[in-house]
Image (cartoon, helix red, strand yellow):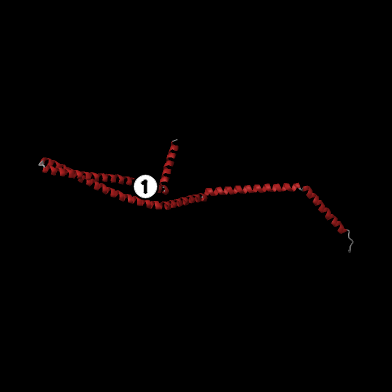
Amino acid sequence: MIKRVRDIVVATVHEVLDHLEDPRAMIKQYLRDVENEINKAKDAIIRHQVMAERFERQAEEALRMAARRKMQAEQALEAGEEELARKALSEMKHWEARADQYRTCADKTAGQVRELKEQLSRLEKKYQELRDKKDALIARANAAKTKQRIHTTLHKIDSESAIRGFERMEERIAQMELQANAHAGENAGGSYLAYADEVEKELAKMRSRRSGSAQSDGGQMPGN
């Protein structure tokens, strides 16, 4: 039982290895892998573009808040409310700092989008190159497999066991031919026996004619 399980496991492993070593399967698998990477890159680009746009909107909103606080500070100063002016200016600086942060995040995300697009371009180019080569590579792989099968078949035919097998078949055919010829001779002999009586009658007629001819020749006068 243990040996049987081991044989099954070994056979399965060999089957997997053979599949992995099949160039046709590897080409198709590589195409699928590149397709997956392309789809991941596209999804990442979309996500980063959305983030970059959100950071841009947040930066613009922060700048608007900073401008509003500046205007409030000027109004407070004109009204003689310096403390309110200071508070408004402090909030203005806060929103300006926030705008700078959002702008930095937007620029960084936009740079990531550019890198992802470059990566996507390379992947798509590689994918197209492999698609262009796929049919030719698979054709070459099929031709190699066919040559390998033919070589294996010829090796089996040329092997000593195969030769002995053909020799045994040749001997058997020769025996069959001898038996067929023997049966044909027996059938021919039987057909001769079927005409035996008629043959004897014809033979008797031939003897009688010969005897009559001999007597006629003997009864002639000399000198004629």
Q: Quadrant of the N terminus?
A: top left
Q: How would you rate the neighbour count of disc 1 (Cα within 10 Å): few for under 14, some for 14-19, many for 20 or more?
A: some
The residue tagged with tag 1: helix, strand or loop? helix
Residue drawn where x is 83% and y is 54% of the image = 209
Residue 198 left/right relative to 46: right
Q: Nearer the viewer, residue 70 or 14?
A: 70
The kind of residue tagged 1 is: Glu
Residue 198, position as x, y percentages in the image: 79, 49
Residue 153, position as x, y percentages in the image: 50, 49
Residue 14 left/right relative to 94: right
Q: Quadrant of the C terminus?
A: bottom right
When asked about the image quadrant of residue 72, the answer is top left
Q: Please say if 209 is above or below 70.
A: below
In the orientation shown, which residue stands out farthest toward the left? 80
Q: Nearer the viewer, residue 153 or 26?
A: 26
Residue drawn where x is 42% and y is 45% of the image = 19
Residue 2 left/right relative to 198: left
| Badge count | 1
When asked about the image quadrant of residue 36, the answer is top left
Q: Nearer the viewer, residue 58 or 124?
A: 58
Q: Nearer the viewer, residue 99 or 187?
A: 99
Residue drawn where x is 11% and y is 40% of the image = 83
In the orientation shown, which residue stands out farthest toward the front? 79
Query: Circle 1 sits on which residue?
Result: 35
Residue 147, position as x, y percentages in the image: 47, 52
In the orientation shown, which residue stands out farthest toward the right? 221
Residue 31 left/right relative to 75: right
In the orientation shown, which residue stands out farthest toward the top? 1
Residue 134, position as x, y percentages in the image: 41, 51
